[in-house]
Image (tube, rainbow, N blue to C red):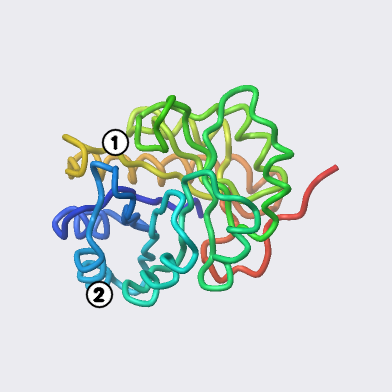
Amino acid sequence: MILVKICGITNWPDAKAACDAGADMLGFNFYEKSLRRVSTVEAATMRAKLPSGVQAVGLFVNAKPAEIASLHAFVRFSAAQLHGDETPSIVSEVTRTVPVFKAFRVAADFQLSTLDKYHEAFAFLLDGVRAGQFGGTGASADWNVARRAVAAHRIILAGGLTPENVGAAIRAVRPYAVDVASGVESKPGKKDHVRLKGFIEEVRRTEEQLQQLEAPETGQPGPGEQTSLSASSPPKKTS
């Protein structure tokens, strides 16, 4: 199963719409410069209302591990998405508190060996590149790079995804999860519930098509083989 993460949730109506549409994860942005920033109290209030099957993810940019741990204790998010210039040692420290999604801005020249330095990260979120910004820009990640990364790592594909292109993205990359913010918004921080529902429906439609094509040939499960943050270890690297 390919997981769906709806990022940049700022209000309960949007959170509920995402849950009702079948989202697996909701992202709450704590970066002070983001147009989608939420307060600790707002995030905790929404987190308390989420169904048991929906996981909350806290998004941070160059935050101190102690700050992340403090917010985690209050909000109880299931993973921390680190979207800045965090070092492997910072990621390692944060993982003592909560699983980490380490985000990278990925163009065609991105070196996949970079990911190997962050061996304690639970997954890698690959986003688009726009100078001076840390995400939520609508710029697409390089799908060819992401496809190669899938062979050795859990990849959350982000950047420029929409209801119109997420099916093609999944077929090209076969990610562990897909992440969307601006692609289902009417304006920054406000979700378009029709587009949100359409995005998730397209993910499930594409996933079903792939399973029908692949299962008879390979005898293997469809894309996105692990669906919980409690999974013990990342996929093994291939030679």
Q: Is residue 193 above or below residue 78?
A: above
Q: Is residue 106 above or below residue 52?
A: above
Where is residue 26? Give x, y as percent: 33, 57
Q: Name the residue carrying label 1.
A: 182
Q: Which mark is residue 105?
A: none
Q: Residue at x 50, y 30 (%)?
A: 141
The answer to whether 195 appears left or right of 108 in the picture is: left
The kind of residue tagged 1 is: Ser
Q: Earlier in the sequence, mark 2 or mark 1?
A: 2
The kind of residue tagged 2 is: Ala
| Nearer the observer, 193 or 26 | 26
Specify few, some or many for label 2: CA neighbours under 10 Å numbering under 14, 14-19, or 20 or more: few
Distance Cα–Cα, label 2 vs label 1: 25 Å
The answer to whether 192 appears left or right of 206 in the picture is: left
Q: Residue at x 49, y 64 (%)?
A: 65
Residue lying at the far right of the rendered structure: 239
Answer whether labels 2 and 1 touch (C-beta < 8 Å).
no
Q: Is residue 237 above or below residue 96?
A: above
Where is residue 78? Give x, y as percent: 43, 68
Where is residue 114? Give x, y as percent: 69, 40
Question: Which secondary structure lies at badge 1?
Answer: helix
Q: Name the residue carrying label 2.
A: 48
Quarter of the view holding residue 238: top right
| Count of marks overlaid on the render | 2
Q: Residue at x 34, y 46 (%)?
A: 200
Residue lying at the far top of the rendered structure: 108
Quarter of the view holding residue 77: bottom left
The C terminus is located in which quarter? top right
Where is residue 223? Give x, y as percent: 58, 48
Question: Which secondary structure lies at badge 2?
Answer: helix
